[in-house]
Image (cartoon, rainbow, N blue to C red):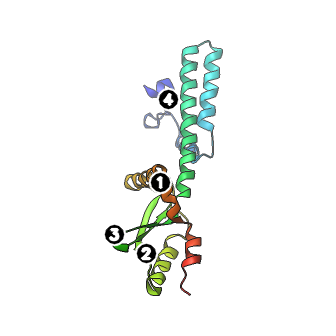
């Protein structure tokens, strides 16, 4: 039915080639990465064609879909920017001075270590921080549901408690200040 209405390529029914289907998947992937507006442009073209046929109800439906899709893409790109900014060393005061450092990379708590109080614990913390932050970040498409939920939770925590950001350090800055003498 969806193939008949044009909302699905119907690869399971053999109505498109493997190349056509793969091209659409690549387009969807680029759209989700914010690198193309092709699905929106396609909807806008179909909307224009519907309006020229005087099928105004269908044109309005396509207009609304295009708007929702554009808003979704804007929010997704903004969220990616938020996630990229959630990489830092976060110091949390603990009971009776047992402070912790949470190493947060792209919105995920990768490690937690005791806040260093002496040279030896500083060396260990420097080793941990140095090991967590270098290298390429994982592809968001590779995240499982638990990892995605963790990112949303961390982002929400800092959005609701912006003062907590005052206790965060950019990893390189933390390393520069905390390296043992």
Q: Residues within 10 Å of mark 4 (few under 14, many from 20)?
A: few
Kindly tell me whether residue 168 is visible in this rendering. yes
Viewer-proximal residue among 95 and 14: 95
**Residue named by callout 2:** 115
Q: Earlier in the sequence, mark 3 or mark 1?
A: 3
Viewer-proximal residue among 173 and 106: 173
Q: Which mark is residue 7?
A: 4
**Helix, strand or loop status at disc 2:** loop
Spatial CA distance of label 2 from label 3 is 12 Å
Q: Residues within 10 Å of mark 2 (few under 14, many from 20)?
A: many
Q: Position of residue 77 (x, y in %)?
A: 57, 46
Residue 27 sits in quarter? top right
Q: Position of residue 148 (x, y in %)?
A: 42, 52
Q: Earlier in the sequence, mark 4 or mark 1?
A: 4
Residue at far left of view? 95
Spatial CA distance of label 3 from label 1 is 21 Å
**Helix, strand or loop status at disc 3:** helix
Q: Residue at x 63, y 27 (%)?
A: 44
Q: Position of residue 5 (x, y in %)?
A: 49, 24
Nearest to viewer (mark 3 / mark 4): 3
Compared to residue 140, the image places residue 44 above or below, namely above
**Residue named by callout 1:** 158
Residue 71 sits in quarter? top right
Q: Earlier in the sequence, mark 2 or mark 3?
A: 3
**Residue named by callout 3:** 95
């Amino acid at each position: 039915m969806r193939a008949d209405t044009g909302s699905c390529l119907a690869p399971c029914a053999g109505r498109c080639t493997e190349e056509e289907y793969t091209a659409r998947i690549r387009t969807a992937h680029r759209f989700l990465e914010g690198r193309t507006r092709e699905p929106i442009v396609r909807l806008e073209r179909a909307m224009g064609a519907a309006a020229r046929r005087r099928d105004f109800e269908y044109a309005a439906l396509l207009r609304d879909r295009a708007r929702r899709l554009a808003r979704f893409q804007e929010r997704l790109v903004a969220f990616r920017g938020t996630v990229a900014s959630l990489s830092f060393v976060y110091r949390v005061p603990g009971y009776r001075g047992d402070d912790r450092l949470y190493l947060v990379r792209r919105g995920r708590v990768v490690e937690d270590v005791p806040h260093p109080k002496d040279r030896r614990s500083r060396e260990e913390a420097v080793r941990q921080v140095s090991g967590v932050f270098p290298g390429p970040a994982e592809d968001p498409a590779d995240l499982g549901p638990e990892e995605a939920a963790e990112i949303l939770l961390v982002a929400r925590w800092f959005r609701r408690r912006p003062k907590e950001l005052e206790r965060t350090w950019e990893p390189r800055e933390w390393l520069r200040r905390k390296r043992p003498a």
